[in-house]
Image (cartoon, coloured by chain):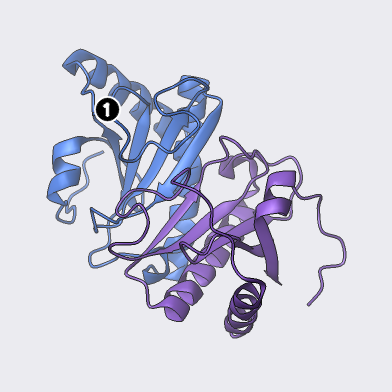
Chain colours: A purple, B blue
Amino acid sequence: MPKPNPIPLDANLERNTVHAAWLDLCDVRIEDDRRWPWIVLVPQREGVFEIHDLSAEDQATLASETAWVASALKEITSCLKINTGALGNVTRQMHIHVIARNEGDSGWPGPVWGFGTRERYEAADMERLKIILAEKLQAY
Amino acid sequence: MPKPNPIPLDANLERNTVHAAWLDLCDVRIEDDRRWPWIVLVPQREGVFEIHDLSAEDQATLASETAWVASALKEITSCLKINTGALGNVTRQMHIHVIARNEGDSGWPGPVWGFGTRERYEAADMERLKIILAEKLQAY
């Protein structure tokens, strides 16, 4: 489903993530780093930097969309643990990370942010992940 | 307000955090590391490891309690950015981190988890922070 009027996307997010699906509040994007299956949700609200800047209704929607994406990612990857986070120390536009983690993956059991060097997907692998994720999220 | 019947607390959380307040769903605790003002929310639900294991109602409550705590911590510390996260790679009992970050703090702009060596508070400083936080959260 194309979103008619998406908000402007931060240049870092544009460069390092790929659009996969639209939810009611969020643009669902895949981080272009094949070391971990990693989704980024971008709430379609301008000028929002912290979760408490969102309205109460948007906070609840964001929570349920984050949980949907987490559940979908866990089903797709059969990962051991989902990591979620909203940091924004470098990229200020509000975005929420949902990452599939497994024992022995890059940086385990530490956090992924800032760890080592990005490894981009082959185009065909990214396309496959996009399709699987979009299909899984349609089921919600 | 004492919580009549808290769920058992993971040993790592017991050792490294200090209780500050009860909200409807969460035990609000302070991470005993003075490098960053750092709150940990522990939802009072047993056997929950991922956000999508919570009921839809609990997810919404957790989102609003996280936002309350984030807002309180930002007011108390006047920090530049709040970082939130739910990892659980080491400590599996579900817990949500809410951390006050500033340019130039330990590890900035990277994540705090696993960074360097914990520096515990002086007892009086921890007591002061507990009181300030509990008072601020009562206002919600």
Could you tell me which residue is drawn at 52 percent across and 64 percent down?
A34
**Percent position of residue A133, x then y:** 59, 77
> Which residue is at the front of the view, A33 or B81?
A33
**Percent position of residue B71, x then y:** 52, 34
> Which residue is at the front of the view, B58 or A85?
A85
Q: Is residue A132 above or below residue A114?
A: below
Could you tell me which residue is drawn at 46 percent across and 63 percent down?
A36
Could you tell me which residue is drawn at 82 percent across and 73 percent down?
A2
Q: Is residue B19 above or below residue A123?
A: above
Could you tell me which residue is drawn at 81 percent across and 53 percent down?
A7
Q: Quadrant of residue A30?
A: bottom right
**Percent position of residue A118, x then y:** 53, 52
User: How many numbered markers are drawn?
Assistant: 1
The kind of secondary structure element at disc 1 is loop
**Residue type, numbered disc 1:** Asp
Classify 10 Å Cα crowding around label 1: few (below 14), some (14-19), many (20 and above): some
Let me know if residue B12 appears in the view.
yes
Let me know if residue A27 appears in the view.
no
Q: Quadrant of the N terminus of chain A?
A: bottom right
Residue at the disc numbered 1: B33
Question: Which subunit holds the residue at mark 1?
Answer: B
Q: Is residue B38 above or below residue A94?
A: above
**Percent position of residue A107, x then y:** 35, 52
